[in-house]
Every structure is written in structure tokens, then in C-alpha cells.
Image (cartoon, grey):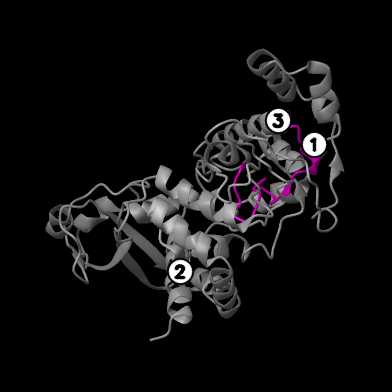
């Protein structure tokens, strides 16, 4: 099988959300057999920004990176230098990666309103109707409900309406060596250097002009906004044409999203999240349930543990499963609390954000309800 990454120029989603922590925004189940990526460039407009010339080859860290690519993957040094001399510094990518000003309160209600709204709901209905067979097949093969796949593609790109026009090579190289000064700067640069490595491998192994790849300011490609490493590891040829094309094949995008979630722990026929109530804190001590907050992107705790520490599900929750306590801060209004299952946290691996996972879940259920009114 071959992978046709037809110049995966893809929408820039809320990838920025995913980039608030070390990245897991890539989907990766390797497609069986060798993949072939075709070099079909279909840019939709001019670059997102006026890029600046920067001779990256004169940067010491870039020189070390090129040495690594030569030693580790057998790249030709002269060709690498020529490629990086053509690469532009994208100041807007750096600016967009900067965190919100200190003291800016998180607001789940405002975030949700950006994604669970009429445009996405109506587009979701149309997308579902147009690709019902592929969505049904993905649900049968992977166990991921059609509405969740619809929710992710809807949040990411409004089903392909908003495709990023940054040259992936420019954006990823800029962030790999000039990431803004944040507490996670070193980890983020390491991540983007890995994605630059993946971009070069993708381009070489599938004979793609790396400068033809278009995507978000973070380098995400295609309807599902996969990073280059995710394409190599999780993208699948779901339409059976022996090419993986995440830009032009909604069917490949549907199968690839489902595959990504399964590879990150999605469980067939299992719930996603349940609303919860937490005990009110006393004046003199932190609440016992506070220790469950911020415990990573994994369901770790039993219902008995949670109940014993003041967390009560608002509806019947399956026993024998593990949960994580999810806090959705609402600005100056009360925080919402939920119990997230393995399926909830599988979505957070797509974008490392509770807000993101809940927005996907809510958009999914809203589209389903609107499509099938009772």
C-alpha cells in the first residue's frame, strides 16, 4: 500500500490547544505495507504570513540537527543545507505559540461556544450524510462512534473548510529552533525537532517536495490535522485506493481519526464522561478530592476512591472502571466537574486539553441529536 499525502494542506485547528503541553497530537498506527505519498500540491491561497529570510544553516543547533540527520538517516548534507537555506522564519508561528497573558482566566463556556455552534453543527450533519458509509464502517471496524469522528474533524477544520496555508517546513523549522520563551520551551523545541525529522523523512521516503506541504502554524496537515509523525504512524488507507490522502479523501481522514483513538486507548461501547459533584471545601483545609486534579491524561481512580474523597457522580457510572477527575474552569463562574473514562482521555491525546476533549464530545452529541431529532 502506498501513502498519497497529497500535499496535505490542512486546516489549522485548535492545535494550539494541544500545544500547551508536551505533544501527543499525532495519530499513529502505521498503515500495513509500504506507504507512498504523492506530491500533489494544491495550495489554496498565499502564505498565511509574510515570512522572513533566515539562513538556518548558520545556526549552530541547526548544524547539529543536520549532522544527526546525516548520521541517523543517511541524508545528503549538501541537499539538507540547500533545503534549509530555502526555509523561512515564520514570526507569526512564534507569536501564536505564546501563552495567554498571566491572570487570564480559563473559561469553558466561552471555549465551548466557539465550537458547538450552528455553522459546525450544520456542516457536521452534511458531512455525516455525505460520508455515512465510511463513518459506519469505521465504527464497525474500530469501535469509535461516528459522531466522535465527526466531532474531531469538525472542531479541527470545520470538515476541511479552514485549511492552513503555512508551509509546513517553514513553520516546524521555526518552532524547532526559535520557540518562544515559555516554561516548556526546551520540551517544545525537542518535540518540533522530532517533527522536522519526520517531515524530512516523509518527504524523502515518499518523494514529496517538502515545501509543497501546507498546514497550520504548528505544522498540522489535513482534515484531521495530523502532524507529520502522526501521518507516518497512524494514517490509514481507508478508501482502499492504495494511497493515504488526508487532504482530499474524507474517507482516509475518517479511518485515520478512528485508528488514532484506538491506538490511544479507545474502548468499544464504553462511555466517555459523567458529570460529577465535589464536596465543598472547608475553610481550614484543602478538599480531599483536590489530589485527583491534574493527574495526567489517564483514567486512574476507582469510583470507591473518588466517592471516599468527596466526588459523587451525578448519574449512574459503570463500576469496575477507572476514571479521572476533570475540572472545566468557567472564568469567574463555578467550575464544572466530570469523571472522564479511558475514552475521554483518548481524545485528549489528540489535543492535550480537557476543554478540547469535552468540546469534541459536546459537538458530537449535538450533531447526532440535530441529525436525528426525536
Please give the name of the residue rendered at 58% of the width and 58% of the height, measured from the top-left corner.
Answer: 14
Which is nearer the N-term, disc 1 or disc 3? 3
Q: Mark number for residue 209?
A: 1
Q: Please tell me how crowded label 2 is: few (under 14), some (14-19), or many (20+) other residues with Cα within 10 Å.
A: many
Which is nearer the N-term, disc 2 or disc 1? 1
Is 213 covered by the magenta stretch?
A: yes
Q: Please tell me how crowded label 3 is: few (under 14), some (14-19), or many (20+) other residues with Cα within 10 Å.
A: many
Q: Main secondary structure of the magenta part?
A: loop
In what element is the residue under mark 1? loop
Q: Please tell me how crowded label 1 is: few (under 14), some (14-19), or many (20+) other residues with Cα within 10 Å.
A: some
Answer above or below: position of 301 versus 157: above
The residue that disc 2 covers is: 364
Q: CA distance from mark 2 to mark 1?
A: 36 Å
In the picture as drawn, the residue positioned furthest to the front comes out as 241
Q: Which residues are magenta?
A: 203-227
Q: CA distance from mark 1 to mark 3?
A: 9 Å
The picture places residue 110, in percent across and down from the top left corner, at: 51, 72
Is 337 covered by the magenta stretch?
A: no
Q: CA distance from mark 3 to mark 2?
A: 35 Å
The picture places residue 294, in percent across and down from the top left corner, at: 35, 50
In what element is the residue under mark 3? helix
The answer to which of 349 and 333 lies nearer the viewer is 349
User: Which quarter of the picture shows residue 279?
Assistant: bottom left
The residue that disc 3 covers is: 200
Amino acid at each position: 500500500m502506498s501513502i498519497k499525502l497529497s500535499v496535505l494542506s490542512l486546516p489549522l485547528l485548535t492545535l494550539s490547544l494541544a500545544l500547551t503541553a508536551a505533544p501527543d497530537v499525532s495519530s499513529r498506527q502505521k498503515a500495513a505495507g509500504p506507504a507512498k505519498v504523492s506530491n500533489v500540491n494544491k495550495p489554496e491561497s498565499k502564505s498565511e504570513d509574510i515570512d522572513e529570510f533566515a539562513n538556518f544553516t548558520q545556526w549552530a543547533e541547526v548544524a547539529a540537527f543536520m549532522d544527526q540527520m546525516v548520521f541517523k538517516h543517511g541524508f545528503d548534507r549538501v541537499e539538507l543545507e540547500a533545503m534549509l537555506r530555502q526555509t523561512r522564519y515564520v514570526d507569526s508561528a512564534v507569536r501564536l505559540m505564546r501563552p495567554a497573558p498571566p491572570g487570564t482566566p480559563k473559561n469553558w463556556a466561552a471555549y465551548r461556544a466557539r465550537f458547538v455552534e450552528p455553522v459546525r453543527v450544520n456542516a457536521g450533519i452534511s458531512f455525516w450524510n455525505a460520508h455515512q458509509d465510511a463513518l459506519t464502517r469505521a465504527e464497525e471496524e474500530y469501535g469509535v462512534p461516528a459522531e466522535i469522528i465527526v466531532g474531531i474533524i469538525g472542531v479541527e477544520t470545520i470538515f476541511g473548510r479552514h485549511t492552513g496555508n503555512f508551509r509546513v517546513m517553514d513553520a516546524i523549522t521555526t518552532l524547532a529552533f526559535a520557540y518562544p520563551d515559555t516554561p516548556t520551551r526546551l520540551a517544545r523545541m525537542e518535540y518540533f525537532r522530532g517533527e522536522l525529522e519526520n517531515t524530512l523523512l516523509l518527504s524523502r521516503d515518499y518523494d514529496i517536495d517538502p515545501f509543497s506541504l501546507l498546514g497550520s502554524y504548528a505544522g498540522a496537515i489535513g482534515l484531521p490535522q495530523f502532524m507529520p509523525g502522526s501521518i507516518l504512524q497512524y494514517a490509514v488507507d481507508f478508501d482502499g485506493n492504495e494511497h493515504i490522502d488526508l487532504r482530499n479523501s474524507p474517507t482516509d481522514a475518517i479511518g485515520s481519526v478512528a485508528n488514532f483513538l484506538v491506538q490511544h486507548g479507545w474502548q468499544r461501547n464504553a462511555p466517555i464522561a459523567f458529570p460529577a459533584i465535589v464536596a465543598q471545601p472547608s475553610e481550614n483545609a484543602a478538599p480531599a478530592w483536590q489530589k485527583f486534579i491534574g493527574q495526567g491524561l489517564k483514567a486512574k481512580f476507582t469510583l470507591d476512591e473518588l466517592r471516599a474523597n468527596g466526588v459523587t457522580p451525578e448519574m449512574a457510572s459503570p463500576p469496575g472502571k477507572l476514571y479521572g477527575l476533570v475540572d472545566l474552569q468557567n472564568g469567574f463562574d463555578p467550575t464544572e466537574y466530570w469523571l472522564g473514562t479511558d475514552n475521554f482521555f483518548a481524545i485528549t491525546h489528540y489535543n492535550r486539553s480537557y476543554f478540547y476533549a469535552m468540546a469534541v464530545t459536546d459537538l458530537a452529541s449535538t450533531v447526532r441529536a440535530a441529525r436525528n431529532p426525536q
